Amino acid sequence: MKLEEIIESKKIYIAGPCSIESEEHIFRLAKIVKESGANILRGGAYKPRTNPDSFQGLGREALDYLVAAGREYGLPVVSEIVDVRDLDYFKNVDIIQVGARSMQSFALLKELGKLDKYILLKRHMGATIDELIGASRYISERGNHKIILCERGIRSFERATRFSLDLNAVPVIKALTPYRVIVDPSHGTGDSRYVEAMTYAGIGAGADGFIIEVHENPEAALSDGMQTIKPDVLTRIIDRVDKISDILRD
Ligand code: PEP
Ligand code: MN
């Protein structure tokens, strides 16, 4: 399906590895993602890691692998930009992700506002909804209204999960903006055991889709293995999400 049709359908099912580990790896994952029924392929090339010693991503070459894998399997692709100087490398990337940590990188947002390309703007873990919407205006006020907003978990006093997926944010953002809103239950929980439940909860709250991390061997993933689900779980999630969203739209 073409990207515009996916956005229009309000069934935005983004899946893929946290980071692209090799050309062969992203092609393998693209096949898995396609077969699961997801419609957009994710993969990180530039990784903003909490610890500077952690895997930082393969950079530009990984973006080329991602684009090629997406083309092979007919999936639009999304990847995160960290540095505005890398913008040229994203020419063939269908959706540019602005990660939580960059949500208020205003110089970056302004540049993305000049593009005719979808921007996936993730809420910072310490930002209010109002601040997220403010950040989105740095993009829209320069002419780019192709914005998708993502609730990806905020920091609360709770320590049982890495972050707390703020489901209130979904209907609130939808009431305050014209944009599609998706949830990220992978980063929102930080724990693969809870991803499935929180995906359904997000869709139940009115989200137009999700972004989920998947890997055929999560224990071996170079980043975010703890929160990464296996392909069979993704297939089940998509099957059920389709049904839930159909019921809610009746
Ligand atoms: C990611 O999507 O891999 C990511 C780093 O997300 P966030 O910016 O929400 O932490
Ligand atoms: Mn990740």
Image (cartoon, helix red, strand yellow):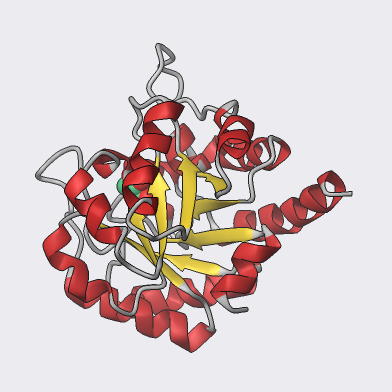
Question: In the picture, residue 159 is in which quadrant?
Answer: top left
Question: In the picture, residue 176 is in which quadrant?
Answer: top right
Question: In the picture, residue 92 is in which quadrant?
Answer: bottom left
Judge by depth and name the residue closer to the eye, 239 or 247.
Answer: 247
Counting from the top left corner in percent of width and height, residue 6 is at: 62, 68
Counting from the top left corner in percent of width and height, residue 17 is at: 40, 60
Q: Residue at x 62, y 78 (%)?
A: 1
Counting from the top left corner in percent of width and height, residue 39 is at: 59, 69
Q: How many marks?
A: 0
Judge by depth and name the residue closer to the eye, 211 or 120.
Answer: 120
- Residue 65 in the image: above or below residue 15: below
The residue sitting at the right extreme is 250
Counting from the top left corner in percent of width and height, residue 74 is at: 54, 83
Judge by depth and name the residue closer to the eye, 237 or 79.
Answer: 79
Q: Residue at x 25, y 43 (%)?
A: 102
Q: Residue at x 69, y 63 (%)?
A: 9
Q: In screen coordinates, is 31 left or right of 138?
A: right
Q: Determine if residue 162 is in view.
A: no
